[in-house]
Amino acid sequence: MQLYTNSLTQYSRLITKEVKIGDLLLGNNHPIRLQTMTTTDTMDTIATVEQTIRCIEAGAELVRITAPSKKEAENLLNIKNELRKRGYNTPLIADIHFTPNAAEIAARIIEKVRVNPGNYVDKKKFEQIDYTDLEYAEEIDRIRERFTPLVKICKEYGTAMRIGTNHGSLSDRIMSRYGDTPMGMVESAMEFLRIARGESYHNIVLSMKASNPQVMVQAYRLLIQQMDAEFGECYPLHLGVTEAGDGEDGRVKSAAGIGTLLEDGIGDTIRVSLTEDPEFEIPVCKDLVKRYAPQAPQKGGVNNSPLGVRGIPYSPFTYSRRKTFAVSNIGGNQVPVVIADLSKLETIIPASLESIGYKYDEPSDKWNISDAAADYIFTGKAELSFALPGTLKVITWPNYNNGTNDKTKYLPIYDAKGFTESESTDSNINFVMLDCFSDETTINDFTFLEELANNPSVVLCLSSTNKNAMQSIRRMCVELIQRKIENPIIITTDSNWQTTDEHLIHYSTEAGALLLDGFGDGVCFGMTAESYQKSVVSSQQSMGRNYSNNTSVEQFINSTAFSILQATRTRISKTEYISCPSCGRTLFDLQETTAKIRTVTNHLKGVKIAIMGCIVNGPGEMADADFGYVGSGVGKITLYRGKEVVKKNIDSEIAVAELINLLKESDAWVEPSLS
């Protein structure tokens, strides 16, 4: 039985069944298809058509449109006809939630329907009900009765279907038996898939979306394993992190979740759910998938290193951090550290540290340290000309380290051979670089690894110059576990891409994939010399981020590092926003409201706030948010604490102030710093 991917050591697409959506072929090694979803009112035909065209011209190969009731489903015909009249034949998808009759109408009109098994037929009242086996079977029979008509219509009309499970909208029945778990998500979809297969209908795509990338990745892996176990085949997979948010955080969270799966060859179509205009999602999709353009197999290195999928010494279906001992503040039970690479700066002065979270106030001779302040800096230079702030320490080459006056603040970094041959290593902490499965340190006999093993002063800095860098580092982590080597590791990732978005996707995908599997006690991101020279971080509107024109590369990288740790839930340094991408159901301006809420709450470290446009993306979709701000009618907002309604149908003009009051009542509010 397959684990969840063809290979853990090299890139190889998972082969899935071929599905036809209009004239578009999906799965079965066809290109990874890009899609998005409109945000206009579906009853506004022209506005929806024009937004759809903007998405198509940006590169969307599929466009989804909400159809919450019969009237919107019927209007899909007008939208489709107008698009065809204008020469656009891109397949359309109807997004259905609570209304089976709307799905049955839409399935006769457009190329694909999406149903959510958690609320298409099932009850969802957030009640704990103990089902007997007989009662559970009766519920399945009820689902079969309500769902089968749609299956038959899709089969008759050649319409494709996505069975799309969302972590936050599991039914009471699934929750009662499986809980709020990845396995519950899988079973929710499998129940519908079994019914469809019973009708010999196979034109199906599946998805397992969650706002938490850890949950999302585990659910997809479990789904693949379950389909293989039951059917001996896998249906195409639509990848997405739902309610990812906007700006840098939305892109990082999406790339960590989607990219982790793409790295293992999983995924046939993707959608990046940003709280921005839908056409801005497509460039991010392009940056994600272009890393996996067809390429010749790599020779040598990790590809020739055996790694049986049945023998991996960790579970890819649950999160558990690799066991390590602590070296200073790295490893053990401590949060992962961030190492800022300042080696490309010609000179380093106190002002240089502002980009990594340290601001020097000259009149008071004090440093202000932010929650996103790097723990170490790598300079590759001699001792700096000023006193370092707080606990910040410098990593530098041994020849410079030997000449420093303060050995507690300046720490050496070696390659493996250099460390084993050195006669003057640090007694407390040494950073040792390993180029995993790319050089003599690891390809053959692991000679240096054995000499480094369990040295109480050694922190391993793992990188790889292999094309399959993530897989190479993961392979090394497996080797460490199998050899019972518990030194902490720093994930070291250089980027040779060119644009800010490309760098962000690169770091989020490669480091995020390792962190989500429990590997990594710190991160260090850098750029090749050529990329560093070409990288200019700007406030391009298409990026949807808040960088100014004078943002340095170092500031961008430091911010990205903390965002990745936050997205993978391995180190919390800021407020987390779970905001839906908007659609025709949305009852207020999501982008404006998200920005307004962010402005007054972004100092609340560790608080998770969900901002949802309507009840469909309401209490269920918020999943593990601490507080929720949900549209409940035109100009009306309902506030939640967890999944509990606290304040209902508040006027939108005062809703943000009421959210702050709720945070205060819940002891989750602190006054923002004036500094």
Image (cartoon, grey):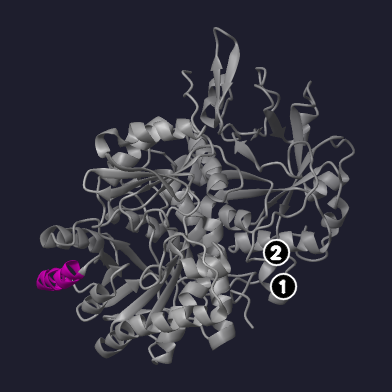
Relative side of 368 to 271, left or right: right
Given the image, on which type of amino acid does mark 2 rest?
A: Arg
Which residue: 26% across, 53% down? 586
User: How many residues crowd around disc 2 within 10 Å: few (fewer than 14), some, or many (20 or more)?
Assistant: many
Which residue: 56% across, 17% down? 360
Labelled pair 2, 1 in contact (Cβ < 8 Å):
yes
Distance of label 2 from label 1 (alpha carbons): 8 Å
Residue under label 1? 307
Whether residue 71 is in magenta: the answer is: yes
The quarter holding residue 551 reads: top left
Chief secondary structure of the magenta portion: helix
Tell me which label, 2 or 1, sits earlier in the chain. Answer: 1
Seen from the viewer's position, the closer of residues 304 and 673 is 673
Whether residue 248 is in magenta: the answer is: no
What is the secondary structure assignment of the residue under circle 2?
helix
Image coords of residue 170 (percent x, y): 46, 65
The quarter holding residue 638 reads: top left
Image coords of residue 538 (percent x, y): 37, 38
Image coords of residue 136 (percent x, y): 51, 78
Region of the chain picked out in magenta, as a range: 70-87
**Numbered badge on residue 475:** 2
Image coords of residue 288 (percent x, y): 44, 60
